[in-house]
Image: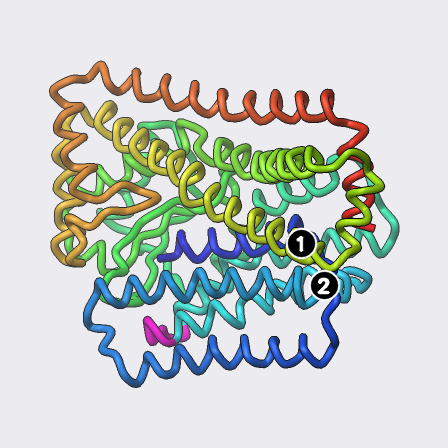
Amino acid sequence: MIYEDLLSLWIAYLLWEFLPSLNFEFTAFFKVFLFIGKEFFFFFGLLFLARRLSFSDSFKSQFLERIFTLLAFLFFSLDIAFFDFKNFLSVYYFADLFIIFWFLHYYFFIKLVFYRLNFKYFRILLGLFLPFFILILADEIFNFFNIHFPGQFIFLLIIILALSPYLVIKIWPVRRIKEGYFRELLSHFFKRVNLKIRDYLILPRLGAKFYTAGILGFIPPFRYLFFSEGLLEIVTPEEVLGILAHEAGHLKKKHGFFLFLLLLTFPLSLLNVLYLILLLFSLFFESPEEIAQFLEGPYGVYFDIGLGLSLLFYSIFFFRVIFAYILRSLEREADLYALLILRDPMPLISSLYKIGEVTGQLYRKSWHHYGLWERIQYLRYAAEHPEVIQKHSLKLRRIFLLWILLNLLVLSIFTYLGADILEKILKIFFS
């Protein structure tokens, strides 16, 4: 659940950064009418469901949540492109902060309706979102003082991601694991695998399905291990070792770096999609002047709508297909690392099975982690065929490298073959 919340905020921010403002020739009254109708439909539609439907039906609840989450992204995209938030806000400082809070007014309401979440969970969300807020604030301050240098955004992103875990745990409702046998077990394991963890923490109960563990932070002085309280109540010390080995796998295999690079390919691939659409569009015209006349004519609005929707749907495709595939592959690699160093699949298998049993999600599919039963079955297979451990790592890195090279190659081809026409079309479209 936390993972999806964090990813949703990333998508919202990237949509704000890369979706263009579309020029629609509608009256202000008509736009205000549509805007109010959109807000009314979204919020009163959710309230209607909350009163009429029972969310005890897990399948129906998940389906409706996905529908309204998609609507939230669609309406947020309309706010940016159709209702001209992009042009209106971009001239002001700290506009990025405002637009993120605007997205959250959709997202938080969905969470309140479907999960009846308590204040502790919102503290966790605030902690997760804090790096984004700091990043935006720092970038705006640099702009205010007219400080610019190559790679400024990437530099700020790296610094903030490295240091923000310390601030995050100050916001989260956590407590330290007390001195004793369990803390010594954790310390001994991480010494064995040569990883430094600053502290070991416990998250309180946040719901019937909140059974999780993870490592927060990339650099040792600001790296924390956390367990949910419910998870510690159901696992044995041997099963804890399986969980620790899995989390260590994420660090040892540099998964944070992989995800960082993968996120950087999103704007690159989005640019490729934009170039492809514009090149295909230009084939129907003989000159840039004809394109300008079409875009300024009565049918230009349909191209604006189509382009905006295409970029939105590609954004969803990237995160739910490409990004999700890499996430699942990284999760599997962490499972295989646990098998490799423990030389026994049972500690991790047993912990996964217990989590599935207590949450009722043993056989449920997961778009970003593989289902628990899928992971259990693959661990059993890998224990009998240890050669798949190395093969999986090689396959994952080859696919990742191929994805990066493919985007660079496509961008180079588009730029070389259609640099002049693309430049003219972009000037026409964004003028």
Disc sitting over residue 24 in the figure: 2
**Is residue 118 within the magenta segment?**
yes
> Eyeballing the image, is 351 above or below 378?
below
Disc sitting over residue 103 in the figure: none
Amino acid type at mark 1: Asp
Q: Give the tally of numbered discs.
A: 2
Q: Position of residue 183 (x, y in %)?
A: 29, 47
Query: Which residue appears at 58% of the width and 27% of the height?
Result: 407
Amino acid type at mark 2: Phe
Q: Is residue 340 visible?
A: yes
Q: Position of residue 172 (x, y in %)?
A: 45, 63
Q: Position of residue 376 (x, y in %)?
A: 16, 37
Q: Nearer the viewer, residue 335 or 248?
A: 335
Query: Which residue appears at 44% of the width and 58% of the height?
Result: 5
Q: Does the CB distance between marks 2 and 1 fall below 8 Å?
A: yes
Residue under numbered circle 1: 304
Tell me the magenta residue range. 113-119
Q: Is residue 348 visible?
A: no
Choose top left, top right, bottom left or bottom right for residue 286. Answer: top right
